[in-house]
Amino acid sequence: MNLDLPELRRLLAIGTGVGIEIEDDVLRVAAVRVRPAGARLLGAATINGFRERTTSGWGAVCTDFLKQTGASHLAATVLLPRREVVVRLLALPGVKDQDIASAIDFQIDSLHPFPEEQATYAWTRLGGGGAVLVAITRKDTLERYFTMFSEAGVKVAAFTFSAAVLYSASRLLARPPAGGFLAFAAAGEGLEAYGESEARPMFSAAFDVPRDRATELASAELRLDSDVEAVDIAALLPSPSGAPPEFDLSRNALAYAAALAGACPRLALPLNLLPVENRSSNSRVIYVPTVALLAAALVSVATLASIAPVKDREYLRGLETETARLQPLARKAGETDHAIEATRAKSRQLDDFRRRSKGALDALAEVNKLIEPPAYLTSLDLVGDSITVAGSAERAEPLLKVFDSSALFQGSEFTIPLSPNGNMQMFRIRAARKGVPQ
């Protein structure tokens, strides 16, 4: 029997997890047990006004809840408030995994509004393409929450954010809606949006506008039809069994999603803002693979020790002599290869420089065509493989499609919310340049 990837993921979906959502002054806690047949809610709790209470006070409530659900040995997956996390989706096609960290570090200061040296970030590839998801928060914010949970006696395995666990939880036991979707959840006095589409593998944002307006803005980012019907975020998650009648999945959807992702961390996006040295173990069985490998190693050593040598000393001496004879030739060949590669690198740099000046002029001319009066620009920033423009237009939302329809640009996005400027709207758009090396 042949199994596709979603079916295989479902068979591997086994574990128990605890999720905690931080929403203003409320903590929502959920514990779930996941099996291939479905997810079972072990319990859910809401701790109101925790910021005004002592850490030992609300920590005792949380600890008692975990004991009652049989999850006291687990470390929690904690969702930071969405407004305290900057989320960026970068297009890095062709960049190898070992080079992504350097590529992000090179441009990280342009991706967030925090003071210099105050940002900490985590990243992961998204899907099979070149999209890379980056989450950024302030170091002092992370340290504050880590200290708070440590003093409360609550073990933490991960600090992450809502979109990362929603992406993972929606694929744990089923498949997300095909063709793209948009979902909302209440977030304090505002709304939190999450969506996916063929044009954008993930969209996450917080809104302080009415739901109709938020739908319009989010649909434009996702390139979905303006009449798309948004759903509740709870509709993306597997329905939990064992939930009491009073359990409201809509209000607890994010904590529930965090618990699902924490139950099966190897099937979830590895996007964890908590430093490795501060992470707590997430399960009692985490030591099982280590013990199994140690046992296998001991068996292998015992087996090798029992096998008599099959090569005599004379044969070994001959190999050593031949190796010593060939070493000078191998060293010379290696030096020649290095010299050739250095020459090729210099040639590629010269070619890139020649192409870059013409490409910059073409990009400026293209922007002049795309921004038609009465719209106008106040700034233009052309850096490497991207371009950032700012200005005002009567209707700024369609500009994303205008830029994406260009032969020179792709992956355009608003970097700041649209704001009124008299009868016009102020905008700031960043787009990737097609054909420019990443």
Image (cartoon, rainbow, N blue to C red):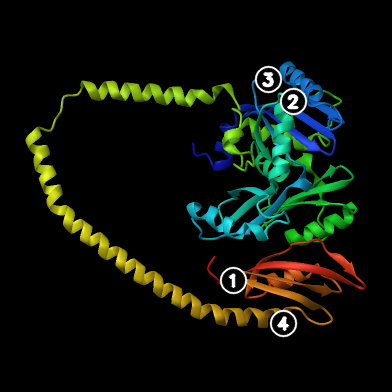
Ranked by sequence position, the earlier of labels 2 and 4 is: 2
Residue 433: image quadrant is: bottom right
**Circles 3 and 4: CB atoms closer than 8 Å:** no
Query: Can you identify the residue that label 1 sits on?
Result: 434
Query: Can you identify the residue that label 3 sits on?
Result: 72
| Mark in the foreground, 4 or 1 | 4
* Residue type highlighted by circle 4: Asn
Residue 296: image quadrant is: top left
Q: Is residue 242 left or right of residue 335?
A: right
Q: Is residue 332 left or right of residue 217?
A: left
Question: Residue 152 shows which numbered tag?
Answer: 2
88 in relation to 26, above or below = below
Distance Cα–Cα, label 3 vs label 4: 61 Å
Q: Secondary structure at mark 2?
A: helix
* Residue type highlighted by circle 1: Lys
50 in relation to 67, above or below = below
Distance Cα–Cα, label 2 vs label 4: 57 Å
* Dot 1 alpha-carbon crowd within 10 angstroms: few under 14, some 14 to 19, many 20 or more: some
Count of numbered circles in the view: 4
